[in-house]
Image (tube, rainbow, N blue to C red):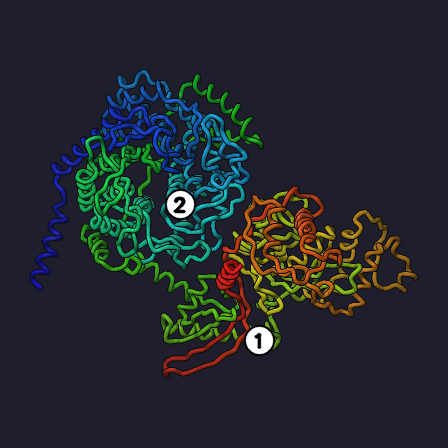
Amino acid sequence: MFIKIFQILFLISTIAAGMSPEEKAQLRLQVIDMFKHAFGSYMKYAYPADELMPLSCKGRYRGSETSRGDIDDALGNFSLTLVDSLDTLAVLGMFDEFEHAVRRVIQHVSFDRDVIVSVFETNIRMIGGLLGGHISAKYINSRHPLRLSWYRDELLVLAHDLGLRLLPAFNTTSGLPLPRVNLRYGIDLTLSKSERERFTCTACAGTLILEWATLSRLTGNYLFEQYADRAMSYLWERRHQQSNLMGTILNVHSGDWIVRESGIGAGIDSYYEYLFKAYILLGEKNTDYLSRFQQHYSSIMSYVQQGVAMVNVHMHQPYRLAKNHMDALLAFWPGLQVMTGDLKPAIELHEMLYQVVKKHKFLPEAFTTDYRIHWNSHPLRPEFVESTYFLYKATDDPHYLEVGRTILTNLEKHARVPCGYAALSDVSTGQHEDRMDSFVLAETFKYLYLLFDSTPHRYIDIDQFIFTTEAHLLPLNLLLFNINDTLRKEFDKQTLLSARLYEQKNLSLTERLNERRAKNNQCPAFNGQFQSHQYKEQLRRNIRGDQDMTETITTSSSITNEKRKRESRNRLTAAEFSAGDPQHVAQLTQMGIQTQTMADGRIQLVHNSANAASNEDADDGLLFIQEMMELMKNVNGIGQSSSDTRHHLPLSVIPLVISPLTKLVSFTVGSAQFGKQLHGKAGIFAQLYVAQPFSACSQLFYPHHLYSRIGIVRRGDCMFIEKARQLEHVQAIGGIVIDHNASLKSSNGAIFSMTGDGNNNVHIPFVLMFKDEAFQLLHLVSKQPNLIVYIGEEKLLKESFYQQMEILESLIEPFNQTSRKWIYGQIEWFKKKNLCQIVPIQLKQLELTIHQEDNHVETEIMNKQPIIQFEHIIEANENKSAEEITSELLNSLNLTAANFGGQLNNIDSYRPAFDKMIRTALANGGANESFKSNITVKQEQQIEIPVEVTTTTTNQEESQQQTTTTTRTTDTREYTEKRSKRNDIN
């Protein structure tokens, strides 16, 4: 006991004593020496190449060395490392070297090169470096007039030129930039649709606004800020509406998510960073950025943070882990949390990262939640140093100086080589890689220097600037960096030229750009307890140990858990329950209810009060089960359904085929919990049109074809309610979603009810149709492009017909002229009153067809033969032609029973007929040139599953009650596995 007390007292005294000013100054000088060794080696062995190869003691030029793949897209033979290092020279007070470097860049750097570069890397390193160098030159000259007196904003001119060369990348329908651009020739439109060029990462498209807004406001060319802002807004629209999480990779043309993993690391990191920093840089009026960041941040801390770890989850199922390892890029997050004022989780996450560093000397590119190496390389990344600097700046805790000393020592001992500093290809063995990225000079040494520098900083007042993701300096007050009138006029001319080239709408942002906002530096609200180093040490001590990071109970995670408990007390009801919603499943788990998928596709709900989180939760679970049983009575017709539960009941889609069929065909469809409800009221009549893009997850093409029609869309890529919003935006009057799972059929009782996102601002009816029935409907549309369908309750078809005859007449004969109102269906009364001058013949035939059915519409396949029976799901992308889609469909069809009007009798005949059917149905009369589908079976959506209840109760113990509820559905993954097995056999 005495020993423990002595150890604690010794630890406290050590923390309180901290690092002496002399030690701190010595470490600052050591950082300067390290930077000089790295920068001097680049200038001696590599300049004017883009990067230094420290093991070979030579420069790396684009195309002169063996290609490293995407890594080389950062290189453009434009002296990358020199430009990226400019403001580091200024921050370290190396003014002579800075002035020489500025002259070299002005004299020798040119962008008129036939080279394809990364838009993302070129922006953050080159445009950011040029802007940081320009700002530093103006700042130094304003305080030391004899220095850089010759400078005439040449770096800003270069940045503007480079920005113009990147603008063609924004030639996309979504507004997201293409990932690469040729600096001389722009974009090859054919190449831009290729597999490599049409996908981009969230961070790649969302890390422009700081540099481009600064460039716009310094030069007056509004296009840069406008395009960057438009890309940010589009990304925000593509978030998952319920979880508010972002995926990692998406299609720049359609906006469809390709990789739906959500985290804070590679591929997404700087998007979050730029949302928050854009609010700081651009002024308090730009609150959209702050609001978006706050919503993202809340979701990240609810789903991505697990214990002390920050793990990737599925954006649409945020309680499901996507991987069990983290990457090194997430180490920037504690620094960002410091800026937002959320210090507790910042301290805890940083300490977890520090434990990884102490175990492996460096932060591996990826590591598991139990501190093991997943990817063993380390390119001397700066993110951990960055967070260490910001935590020290916020807390003044000497612990972070010791962390910085550890980083510095490891760099000097394990990365220093005679010609610079070499990346490590394996942190476990210390093996070097012939690589020194420009960010080592731009960021790693800059943050290390600032960590050990005195406050206020001796050369540049850092508090008047904000750091970009590449640690370049942008001023919080842009008014201090005006340019001369002559240059302003030149920029204005170039703005007009570029606007004619790139701005189709010729929008003007003059008012916004003339409103120069000066933003005072803001510090987060500081809790007094953080002044105690002992309190911070207590937070860190809880992190240390060999336990799994996801199981570590941190102060911040315990608060989050308590918050979840408080939220769960607003109990989920059976009517609200969505089996596809992971949040609902999590709430059931807390109530002691487990969901299990059975072999036949049904879902079993098992309630065991002993498994509930509390007695209150157990009671909630019992109430939920009772509600579900009552709800299922209503759904199965045992009881009377209320208005609150009617959305679980199916509806019907009935094509109004007048001739030659003698009976109408009814397709059973699932309804939606949002939008206009058609239960117990008249249905709707309208013609159909296949939406483009088929997913309806982004802005729809040909809106005039969807006006007053029912849009047909496919399931996948976004929430149901998002598709409905897109259709309503173009004034469609309803929507039909085609499901992609061929194993689900209305005949087996698997009818779904689609859920929304809690924001019911949709006012059109929306239904889900299974794939077999949907392709029969498409076949009918291919034969009759102006086919009219009815959506509603089957029993109300006749009543709806008489209520909406004028609408039907306008659809059947849009140019038919009637001069007076008339009532149809009473022939004798007609003869007497003679109120109708012209009655469409087809409308009479339709009425007779409905009457002949005697109010009974048979649900059957046309001509009692299946048109198409699918046994496989086709995975196609949006760039495949109708011929390719037809070929893949034919290869996967079971055509044992098919009939196309009795005209076809062999497999070869099906190909042109089916091709024509696809083309005609999707073009709907030739309105579209081609059908481009990006069907996917990987999309997991929220579906509300009405349950058929069978209940059993067993008493395992007196304190336990177990109730079993069985639900009818189908597991898509199980179907996919079966399909894969069949493919293997074939």
Q: Which residue is found at the position 46% from the left and 19% from the top? A: 490
Under mark 2, the amino acid is Ile
**Where does the image place residue 13, in percent across and percent down from the top left?**
11, 50
**Location of residue 206 with respect to 247 vertically, above or below:** above
The residue at the point 65 percent across, 50 percent down is 690
Examine the rendering and report whether any part of residue 767 can be seen.
no
Of callouts 1 and 2, the N-terminal one:
2
> How many labels were placed on the picture?
2
Give the alpha-carbon distance from disc 1 to disc 2, as whole Å. Answer: 47 Å
Quadrant where the C terminus sits is bottom right
| Residue 943 as seen in the image, left or right of residue 41 | right
In the image: residue 955, left or right of residue 709? left
Query: In this picture, is 940 found above or below 271?
Result: below
- Whether residue 462 is situated above or below residue 5 in the rendered picture: above
Is the residue marked by circle 2 packed among few (<14), some (14-19), or many (20+) residues within 10 Å? many
Q: Which residue is mark 2?
A: 268
Q: Tag 2, which secondary structure?
A: loop
Q: Which residue is mark 1?
A: 633
Query: Given the image, on which type of amino acid does mark 1 rest?
Result: Lys
Residue 488 position by quadrant: top left
How far from the left and from the top, in percent, is residue 610? 37, 76
The answer to whether residue 960 is above or below residue 515 is below
Circle 1 sits in a helix, a strand or a loop, which is it?
A: helix
Point out residue 216 in the picture as x, y percentages from the top left corner.
Answer: 44, 29
- Please tell me whether mark 1 or mark 2 is closer to you in this view: 2
Q: Are marks 1 and 2 in contact (CB under 8 Å)?
A: no
Residue lying at the far right of the rendered structure: 832
Residue 634 falls in which quadrant of the image?
Answer: bottom right
Q: Residues within 10 Å of mark 1 (few under 14, many from 20)?
A: some
Asked if residue 751 lies left or right of residue 16, the reply is right
